[in-house]
Image: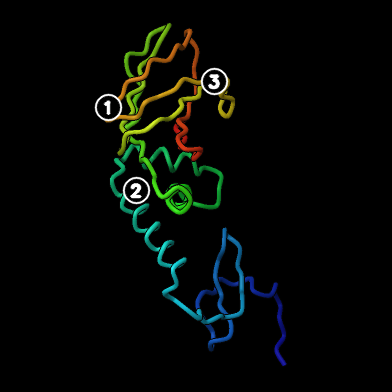
């Protein structure tokens, strides 16, 4: 008989134990589950997920440093990385919509007391919406945006700070 002096499963353990238990960490929490051998590792659904992950990963690799930093900032306070958030949104879009327009190299230029130009680079042509407001998460104004390479969009700023996000095909791509 063993005597336990600490909480059960409080140690960091990972991996498979004798084809019966799998120890892992999920969102910062130690977990254990029963090992289940997949019955069909090459099903049509699994192939679709693999294809979506490959495409999303390829798009993430094209992001520049500032774009990756924006995703890291988006993940602040969450038990996941910016890469995880990006992959989650991209894979969902690729599985449901079969397309994902990568929006990157977002820059604010020509900032004056009454306007600002937002330079957007998109991987594909398409329609989107730029929403903006004076508080994070509060986007009360919007303008339509035609996505093309190096599209410039003018937004009135009225001399105050604005936060904005770009939405396309109901998949949220946020740059704040």
Residue plotted at (45% across, 72% down) = 43
The image shows residue 99 at horizontal and vertical percentages of: 39, 46
Q: Give the number of the mark in front: 3 or 1.
A: 1
Secondary structure under badge 2?
Answer: helix
Secondary structure under badge 3?
Answer: strand
Tag of residue 150: 1
Residue plotted at (31% across, 37% down) = 124
**Total number of numbered discs in the rendering:** 3
Secondary structure under badge 1?
Answer: loop
What residue does disc 3 label?
A: 133
Quarter occupied by residue 71: top left
Residue plotted at (56% across, 63% down) = 26
Quarter occupied by residue 108: top left
Q: Residues within 10 Å of mark 1 (few under 14, many from 20)?
A: some
55 is higher (above) or lower (below) than 120: below
27 is higher (above) or lower (below) than 90: below
Instruction: Compare residues 4 and 36 and report the one nearer the observer.
Output: 36
What residue does disc 2 label?
A: 60
Instruction: Compare residues 122 and 82 and report the one nearer the observer.
Output: 122
Residue plotted at (36% across, 21% down) = 118
């Amino acid at each position: 008989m063993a005597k336990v002096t600490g909480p059960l499963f409080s140690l960091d353990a990972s991996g498979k134990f004798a084809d019966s238990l799998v120890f892992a960490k999920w969102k910062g929490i130690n977990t254990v589950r029963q090992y289940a051998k997949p019955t069909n590792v090459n099903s049509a659904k699994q192939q679709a997920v693999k294809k979506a992950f490959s495409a999303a990963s390829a798009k993430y690799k094209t992001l520049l440093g500032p774009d990756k930093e924006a995703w890291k900032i988006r993940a602040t306070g969450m038990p996941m990385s910016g890469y995880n958030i990006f992959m989650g949104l991209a894979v969902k879009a690729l599985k449901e919509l079969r397309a994902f327009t990568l929006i990157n190299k977002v820059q604010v230029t020509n900032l004056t007391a009454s306007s600002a130009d937002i330079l957007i680079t998109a991987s594909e042509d398409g329609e989107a919406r730029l929403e903006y407001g004076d508080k994070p998460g509060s986007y009360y104004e919007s303008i339509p945006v035609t996505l093309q390479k190096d599209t410039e969009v003018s937004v009135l700023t009225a001399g105050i700070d604005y936060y904005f996000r770009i939405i396309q095909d109901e998949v949220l791509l946020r740059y704040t």
